[in-house]
Amino acid sequence: MKLVGSGLRKLLQRPATWITGAIVVGLMALVFIALGATINMSTVPEVQRAALKLLLQFPGAYTYIVSEIISTGGLFLIAFAAAVAGSEWQWGTLKAAVARGESRWRYMVLTLAAVALIVGVVILVSFIAAVAGAVAGAALGGITSGTLLDRDALLALPGELLRAWLALTEVLAIGFAVATLTRSQLAGVGAGVALFIGEQFATLILPDVIKFFPFNAAAAVVERPSIEGVTTAVLSPDAALVVTTLWLCAALALVVVATERAEITG
């Protein structure tokens, strides 16, 4: 716990932590405000307009918000986690920790745990911002917000937010593992983002295979409504949860092996 606390203090002192969090939170609010502003545009088909209304009305909007947090936050958080892991090598903080007698793999895994805790806070703040954005978007679109205090939806929310946290932890763990393997911030960020974007494009070619890949699996842990009613090949939320957990374990294993086998010099 001492290492996790130290990692949290170190992360909170980095501007990148606050900037990344602010970007994700701001985007979540803007996404739902933009949906509301789009409803009454003359170029929007009636079928799509009806679907947009459903996305902004509670309690159904809660599930879409949680799903959108995963989709919107994933790209930024994988870059952030890769930058954190790469800096441990380039700034010499891992070497200093090892010199103090810390276990290599334990230090890196607990640093990743600190990043995951920060992400948990970002998820909660993003959720609040998105709910406010959805209410504002509904007002812009001239529709009611629905029932925000629906009992069943509120009871289901903790489980859905935990699923989102696991999904984003898996995503950032992939970036963290890549940066640990390359021992470079730039290479880690570039490779992590390339993998994220590449997987999205590959979905168009091999959807039945790519749905088992880490980022697609993470996006499926919470059922995502379709704005246009287009059916795509995705895992069921429970199957996606299992696949996501396996990818997370694989990323952690890669971090441990890469850290233990690396030469720490300089």
Image (tube, rainbow, N blue to C red):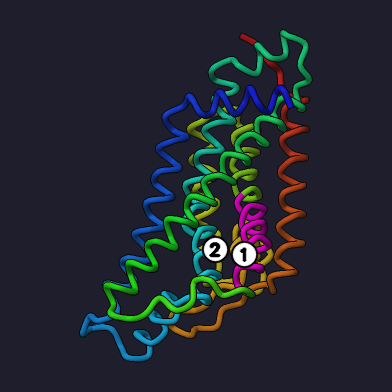
Q: Which span is picked out in magenta?
A: 153-168
Q: Is residue 159 magenta?
A: yes
Taking the image as shown, residue 174 lies to the left or right of residue 185, namely right
**Depth check, front residue: 36 or 168:** 36
Badge 2 density bin: few <14, some 14–19, many ≥20, Cα 10 Å: many
Q: Give the quadrant of the N terminus.
A: top right
* Image point (54%, 28%), residue name: 11
Q: For mark 2, what is the residue?
A: 66
Is tag 2's residue or tag 1's residue first in the polypeptide sequence? 2
Q: Taking 77 as reference, is 58 above or below it?
A: below
Q: What residue type is disc 1 on?
A: Leu
Residue holding disc 1: 157
Residue at x 44%, y 81% (from the top left corner): 54
Is 208 or 232 nearer to us in this picture?
A: 232
Secondary structure at numbered mark 1 = helix
Q: Main secondary structure of the magenta part?
A: helix
User: CB of mark 2 within 8 Å of CB of mark 1?
Assistant: yes
- At 53% from the left and 53% from the top, the residue drawn is 196
SS type, badge 2: helix
Nearest the eye: 62 or 226: 62
Residue 207 appearing in the image:
no
The amino acid beneath tag 2 is Val
Image quarter where the C terminus lies is: top right
- Camera sees residue 103: yes
Looking at the image, which residue is at 39% across and 67% down? 134
Residue 94's place in the image compared with 121, above or below, is above
Residue 24 image position (x, y, % from top left): 43, 49
Disc 1 packing (10 Å; few <14; some 14–19; many ≥20): some
Q: Is residue 212 left or right of residue 147?
A: right
Which residue reaches farthest bottom?
A: 46
